[in-house]
Each structure stands twice: as structure tokens, then as C-alpha cells.
Image (cartoon, rainbow, N blue to C red):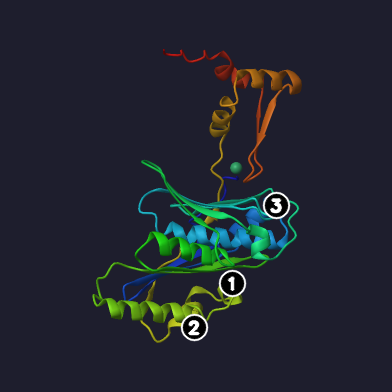
Amino acid sequence: MDDTTDITDPTTTDRARRFLFEQADIRGESVQLDAVFSDILAVHQYAPGVSRLLGELLAAAVLLRGTLKFEGKLVLQARSEGQIPLLMAECSSAGEVRGIARGADLATANDFGQLLGKGSLAITVEPQRGQRYQGIVPLAGDSLAHSLDAYFRQSEQLGTRFWLAAGERRAGGLLLQQLPAQLTTDPAVREQQWEHVCALAATIEPPDLLELGPEELLYRLYHEDSVRLFAPSPVAFHCSCSRERTLRALSAIGKAEIESLLREMGCITMDCEFCNQQYRYLREDLTDILDSRPRPVLH
Ligand SMILES: [Zn+2]
């Protein structure tokens, strides 16, 4: 990844905007990904059906980043027996996004079931410090948004709904989430308010998520409600790979294998699958691994 990306750059078109209903305990977030999506698509060539689902998963990862309560990252992984064996998207608390579709080179379908059939969706929260947490649900219904809805139905008491879309160059999404009771304590009224905002959100079509800016989208849906829109939080494509991390991965394959690769090739190269960055190691770069003694085995 180049170091020139400045995620605080105000001219970037990639934006996530949080909003809050002022008379109901409900929050929301809208996201549009332009540069992030095209940067990721520039690394790999994907068929249209694959890039559409990757775009939707990237938008979902950015929306879910808002649920992180500490520094770290959120990783979404869809595994399936369909034409996309693995689809992955992650977003850090700082707004750094990356994603990939693995093993989908021969995918031709556009249909969700053919692309991600018989699959599961894992949501992993990786704090910078502390325990990682993972929840898994079957890929349900006919979309990633429905699968995420199902995940939150089973794991959270607070209602959470997703709307996702992606085209050739842009991905977009909308999240609505109930907040703990504060303004409205009557459960029946809470439910009514939640159904009201969800019913209106259900009137948007995928092109609206891609074409309307956050102000327009919120006006279209909620001009009769009082909604506060917060300043945009920027997001950017950024890969977290590094020479040190790659070296750690290399040390795990074992000395004998490294020796044999060096004899055969003269050097070892490792490519990052997220950003295509190539890391190249000569024998002298690997002396720490090759000279290390095996750990004593304690009986
Ligand atoms: Zn990378």
C-alpha cells in the first residue's frame, strides 16, 4: 500500500455519515465507497457478480465499524460452497479498509445463491488489546444484508437492519440500529418508532444508496422526522501488511522448507493478496530464522 493515502483528506469521496433520530432511541449510518472500492478492484480482476458482493461486504464492514467500542478492527468473512469460496472485508476503527474475494476466478453467476450458496458469515472483532470475539451465522435469505439482519436478530436485543448495494464503481449502504431506552421507555412506542423508520428505509432502491448523498437520502426517507446528521468520518483503502508480518508468517513454515526454497530459487518472495505488495527475502535477510535453535522440549 502506498503511504500517500491521507484518510483525513477532506476531498476524498469516501464517506461514512452517522445520524441520530432526535425523538427516538435510534441511530443510523450511511456509507458510500468510491476510491476505496476502485482501489480494491484495481488490485484484482473480478467478475461483476463477485465485485458487487465484495462492494456490499466492504460497505457492511464500514457500517459495522461504528459498533467498535475500542481501537481495533472488524472483519467480515463469508465462506461458501458457491462460486465464491471466501469473501472478506475489514475496516479498522481508524477507517482503514481492505477486502478480497478468494478462489472466485471462475465465477460467472450474478445470483446470490450461486455465488455464496451453502455458506456462513463470520463477524470478528479484533481489539488492538484484549480478546478477539467471533460470531457466525449461516448465509441466509438472498443477500448479505439479510444475512447480517439475521445475525443481529439472534445475537442482539437491539434491532439492527442493513441495506447494501454496489455497482461497477461505487458501493453504498445504510444501517439502522436501536439504542438502549432513554427517550422512550414504553416498549410499545419503541417498537412503533422502530417499525416506522425501518418501513421508510425499506422504500429505498439499490440505486438510491449509490446515487443519493447522505443529506438527500435522509431527506427522502425522514423529512418528517427530526434527524441530526454528524460530520463525515473518512475511510480509505489501506493494507496492514508489512515486511515484519510477512517475516513472521515465513518463520512458521520451518527452517527445512526455507532452506529448500532458498536452494531452489535463490530468494523467497511473498505477495500480499490484499494489495499485491511483494516482499522479497535473500538468505541474509533470514539468518534470524535459520540460525535460531529449536525450542527445548520439556518433558
Ligand atoms: Zn498488503
Q: Which image quarter: residue 68?
A: bottom left
Residue mark closest to the camera, 3 vs 2? 3
SS for dot 3:
loop
The reply to whether residue 23 is in sight is no
Placement of 231 over or under 130, stated as above or below: below
Find disc 2 in the rendering and name its residue.
220
Placement of 246 over or under 237, stated as above or below: above
Q: Position of residue 120 (x, y in %)?
A: 55, 54
Residue beneath the point at 57% across and 29% down: 247
Q: Position of residue 14 (x, y in %)?
A: 54, 63
Placement of 121 over or under 157, stated as above or below: above
Mark positioned earlier in the residue sequence (1 or 2): 1
Give the CA separation, mark 1 to mark 2. 14 Å
Cβ atoms under marks 1 and 3 closer than 8 Å: no
Amino acid at the residue labelled 3: Ala
Placement of 276 over or under 108, stated as above or below: above
Residue beneath the point at 69% across and 48% down: 103
Mark positioned earlier in the residue sequence (3 or 2): 3
Find disc 3 in the rendering and name its residue.
104
Find disc 1 in the rendering and name its residue.
210
SS for dot 1:
helix
Q: Nearer the viewer, residue 115 or 81?
A: 81
- Determine the residue located farthest toward the front in the rendered image: 118
Cβ atoms under marks 1 and 2 closer than 8 Å: no
Give the CA separation, mark 3 to mark 2. 37 Å
Q: Position of residue 261 (x, y in %)?
A: 70, 22
| Ligand 1 location (quadrant) | top right
Amino acid at the residue labelled 2: Arg
Cβ atoms under marks 3 and 2 closer than 8 Å: no
